[in-house]
Image: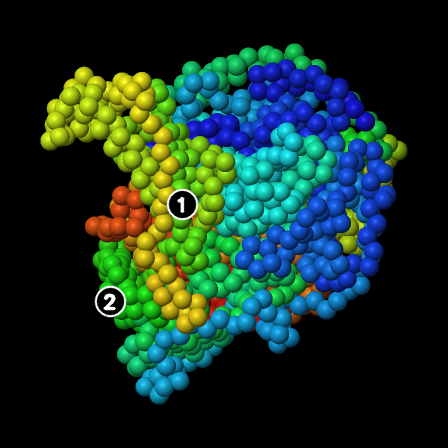
Amino acid sequence: MKNFDAISHIKGKSLYIDDFSLPEGTLHALVFDSKIAHGKILSLNIEKAKLIEGVYAVITAKDIPNENQIGGIILDETLLAENEVHFIGEPIAIVVAKSLEIARKAAKEIEIEFQKLDVIIEPRDAFAKNSLIVPPIIFSSGNVNEAWKECDLVVEGSIDSGAQEHLYLETQGAISIPIEENKIKIISSTQSPTAVQKQASKVLGVPMHQIEVDVLRLGGAFGGKEDQATAWAVMSCLAAKILNKPVKLVLSREDDLRMTGKRHPYSSDYKIGLTKNGKIIAYEVTFYQNAGAVADLSTAVLERTLFHATNSYFIPNVKATGISCKTNLPPNTAFRGFGGPQGMFVIESAIVKAASLLGLSPSEIQKRNLLVDNNSFYYGQVVKNSQAVNSWVKAEEKFNCKLMLEEIQNFNNKNKLYKKGISFMPICFGISFTSSFLNQASALVHVYSDGSVGISTAAVEMGQGVNVKIASVASRIFSINVNKIKVESTNTTRVANTSPTAASSAADMNGNATLIACTTILNRLKNFAKIALSATENDVVTIVDESVLLNNQKIELTWQNLIQKAYFNRISLSAQAFYATPEVHFDRIINQGSPFAYHVYGTAITTATLDVIRGIYKIDSVKIVHDFGESLNKNVDLGQVEGALVQGIGWMTMEEIKYSEEGKLLANALSTYKIPDIYSSPENIEIVFLEKSKNKFGPLNSKAIGEPPLMYGIGAYFAILDAMKSAKPSKKFEISAPITPEKVLVSLHG
Amino acid sequence: MEQKLEFILNDKNISVHDNPAKTLLDFIRNNEGLKGTKEGCREGDCGACTVLLGEIVSNKLKYKSVNSCLFPVGRVAGKHVVTIEGLNDPKNLTPIQEEFNNEGASQCGFCTPGFVNSLTGYVIENNKLEFHKAENAIAGNICRCTGYSSIKRATDNVVEFINSLNIISNERIKSLVDKNIIPKYFLEIENRLIKLKKNESNDNNSKMLVGGGTDLFVQKAESLLSQEISFSNNYNLNEIKIIGSEIQLGAAVTVEQIKNSEIFIKYFPTLTEQLSLFASLPIRNSATIGGNIVNASPIGDSTSIFLALNSDLIISSKEKKRKIKLSEFYKGYKILDLMNDELVEEIIFELPGSNTKFSFEKVSKRTYLDIASVNSAIKIETENNLIKSVFLSAGGVSPIPLLLKETSNYLTNKFITAQLVLDSINIVHSEISPISDIRGSADYKKLLLSQLIKAHFIKLFPELVDMEVLL
Ligand SMILES: Cc1cc2nc3c(=O)[nH]c(=O)nc-3n(C[C@H](O)[C@H](O)[C@H](O)COP(=O)(O)OP(=O)(O)OC[C@H]3O[C@@H](n4cnc5c(N)ncnc54)[C@H](O)[C@@H]3O)c2cc1C
Ligand code: FES
Ligand code: FES
């Protein structure tokens, strides 16, 4: 079973926002945004624009009927700027016209005057000016200050990692359709239907039940449509409300790149202390997170950075400080890994630096400090079912690591123009929303009288394959063919109060809710069957492959007949179920607790070849042992690892976001912002499923898969760095990520 | 501005009056409501909008992939446009589509129709399929979800499967129809195209001239809608030929044509391979040499190549024809020795002699489908290790595509050594004026050009230059 709608994708029949046939009279909206990064709006004149034929409205903050506020965690984000602008791309007005061309023409007629204010781009500058989203957050355990004394080596350093554009192939967009008196239906490309519903209801000043949000599928999201799909949906809804007409708003790629936030860039300081044989005793780290102009999800992202500051390692003394810095960039936001990758990159950098000073290989230090059961994470959670050592050892054996190292050594001895490098990248990623209340999901399952099944949950399909997983849960519980099952669009009138499809946990939680709902129906069916078959208390009814069995004997009763009979006997064939992840909690006063249901582990070995003359490189192979649990769908899970890996490699190598001093995005098109193409994906990717791993929190023992494998991509950076060391053993390299060909060449020969 | 346009879209004859500068993408999606062709960027960089274009070339129906977002609908007159809807079988997946399904090569699905089109185009046009060539045919398609592994597996399966069929090469389309790889209506296309009238009268030189449109439609698609346009490939400038001791290229010759040209393969075998570094197949299928030269990007690839080949341009207007050195054509940033009513007709250069070597180098952030940070080409004629003549060019280090004349002079009549290479690099530095931009800092570009010059010599004269000195 492949991705649910794969066949219709492949035939080009799947619909995305831009493809829906529009109701008659649909208008098109365009966002007019700030061209400066920080300033006061002195005057805004929309009169000329309004006069253009075909323009229906130019909507500004003044036209908002209720609250001009869409902040998710912190209420600091206006829908449309009022008096001040804080980043280039900040929405100021919505131009609504008969066609997009007219709207574009009209937007050029809007006159605006600014008084420019100081612009901050770098997080450390923001920190120096005390421009913060929230006060610093500190997690710690043990006592680092005492611990430094016990160390044979204490190393300090600083390292930066860059932003990353999501580059979902489908840009942001929504269509809002007024339905009768007050009700509006929003078709949105969002990971968070409820967030869209809630913010629209707030901006319009109507109860949530007047807003219906429907999400069919997303053409990619990767976190970029968790919080940042909301604004566009609310804008189209606002326009639809004001004009009482359907309004479509789809961002062009250029607008999308300019107006939306990215993965947070970080600038970090670390200090690591070890014994001479590589045991890590203490680690202190400060993360300066570049949050952009408003909070968005930054504080939650920063927390996850802190949770993953020690990656897969047990370190007894840790102090980690997270500082969310407010700058004049578009609000940075969720991106696969949600701050985890940024945290892990720093500890890995610290280990590599320490290794060179101790005369060890980085992998010796890594392996020596891997988490084992009953260790504690430094935020208090006890390690259970750790697969860190398991996956590492398995990777060493399975991929004949010794031989790999030898081959690289030989190659490097023989070649001068090209050098090879290798790295190990263990990962440990916590599963659950760290805001514990979000760990809830629901499912609504209908069995129709012909035996077909329709399922609605809170999960949004965006290519990650959640629908096929939910269908396979239902198919296994009912023991019916998946082609009898349809997973419906995500709709707030069918499933309310949805948590975002994020944190890798949608399949877990919605799968579990589906499992409960299906089980409820199944039990009703079994009870009914017993009565219908005049069976006794002790008889056992089961359903296997669409046949009803009595005491394991086939009888002349199929699934379809059973359903029909149940219907005529007035048995409820629908069930709604709720699932809340048990046991997760975190105390934000002491910053200790058990925020994760479980962790996902794995190890990647990456090799790279460096072209010493040209400063370019190629990732040759990535070999991974990954802990999938009992995979619900191997095809989908494999695809998630491969896709996340290459996205991680992109973040670490070629994907470079640059802003000018005035806060202007320089990589503002696909011609300048490069994501991996088919040739950048490693020639040899090998993925091994770690066996015999169970997980009571995942439906049918499965494990979450969306985010963790992205962090294998970090290995690419260190493999390239390793090759550079072979090329120039005497040089000390301090290279921020991404490690672009430019940085490589300048570091080697500059 | 409207023009009568007749062409075939999938199985349907189209006859409309429309603006020839409208993009094919908008025509397909908005006029025809075919939504399988997606918009991902409108600048030729994602491939979501890829369609196939069939036309009769030397009495044979040939298909190629193009980016419909940069392709003016005026240029499809008389041709066959194939979108994903035109490849679908009403019931089943085609065997090519089937492999995408089997391998899980479609996740969010947004990129998928583009991939299927590109790969099908490759399958239609090639007799003996090879994985690496198939991969190159889909390299202009970007996927953000899969990481490409599943797509590579699907491609590999397709190559193997199609090769295993007994396909008769001189009846390839019929054969592919028989095996259900493409739909039945393809059988009739050739005849239907012959019946279509082409409106190719083009004599007004004051119209905006469009080559492949791959620069124009990125830079000013909107303003083109309100201009009269004409197409350079309507001037019979599509040939590559040898006349005497010279190679002549029509200005409407595409990059892909050069890449596959027997003449170039014979005289510049490494160059033709390296042209896969130029954009992507669908762009190369459209991009003309004339466009590249007249666009005058300081970092154009073919400009660097033809500068090093010491080329001349033939430029014509209604009144006269003239010939100038390509190196004299560029007067400043995007300032050309070209009048409004003039047309670049041909690029002409000498056939390389037996002692002549040629090398092209290009480094970009992403190796493929990316504009260079710096590129460089060199043509060098030697006799017993002595440089008789040399033309060295560089892109990305000055406001114009640059022939490094002083460096070339300096190198002439010297024996090739590593030290000579190092010395020449000092001269190079006095000739260039790189600026810092998104493709790299000025210092990087300076360093990179030095490295590429070393690379030329290491590649061409490995036995003469001491690598230790150059590393
Ligand atoms: C995704 C993408 C990737 C690219 N990658 C590369 C790359 O790797 N390397 C590279 O060098 N370029 C690259 N380009 C740029 C572009 O493809 C080339 O410059 C191409 O050769 C332009 O040719 P064209 O025929 O499409 O030009 P057009 O866009 O049609 O025309 C460009 C200019 O030339 C004029 N013109 C065209 N023909 C003539 C003529 N015969 N006489 C007078 N004027 C004429 C036009 O009026 C216009 O001003 C890329 C472009 C895209 C969109
Ligand atoms: S839309 Fe991206 S290449 Fe055409
Ligand atoms: S499947 Fe989503 S972009 Fe390719």
The correct choice, above or below, for B203 with respect to B317 in the image is: above
From the viewer's side, name the closer residue of A321 and A682: A321
Residue that numbered label 1 is attached to? A441
Chain label for disc 2: A
Judge from the rendering whether residue A125 lies leftward or rightward of residue B433; answer left or right: left
**Whether residue A142 can be seen here:** yes
The location of residue B291, given as percent across then percent down, is 71, 40
The residue depicted at 72 percent of the width and 44 percent of the height is: A94
The location of residue B78, given as percent across then percent down, is 67, 20
The residue depicted at 75 percent of the width and 20 percent of the height is: B17
Q: Are marks 1 and 2 on the same chain?
A: yes
Q: Mark 1 vs mark 2: which is more N-terminal? A: 2
Specify few, some or many for label 2: CA neighbours under 10 Å numbering under 14, 14-19, or 20 or more: few
The N terminus of chain B is located in which quarter? top right
Q: Are marks 1 and 2 in contact (CB under 8 Å)?
A: no
Regarding mark 2 in the picture, which secondary structure is present there?
loop
Q: Quadrant of residue A388?
A: bottom left
Judge from the rendering whether residue A323 lies leftward or rightward of residue A700; answer left or right: right
Residue that numbered label 2 is attached to? A374
Does mark 1's beta carbon lie closer than 8 Å to ligand 3? no
The location of residue A104, given as percent across then percent down, is 75, 40
Q: Quadrant of residue A711?
A: bottom left
Instruction: Please tell me how many numbered marks the rendered image carries.
Output: 2
Q: Quadrant of residue A29?
A: top right
Task: Give the amino acid type for the residue marked by disc 2 in the picture.
Answer: Asn
Task: Give the amino acid type for the residue marked by disc 1 in the picture.
Answer: Ala
The residue depicted at 39 percent of the width and 35 percent of the height is: A444
Regarding mark 1 in the picture, which secondary structure is present there?
strand
From the viewer's side, name the closer residue of A402 and B143: B143
The residue depicted at 31 percent of the width and 18 percent of the height is: A568
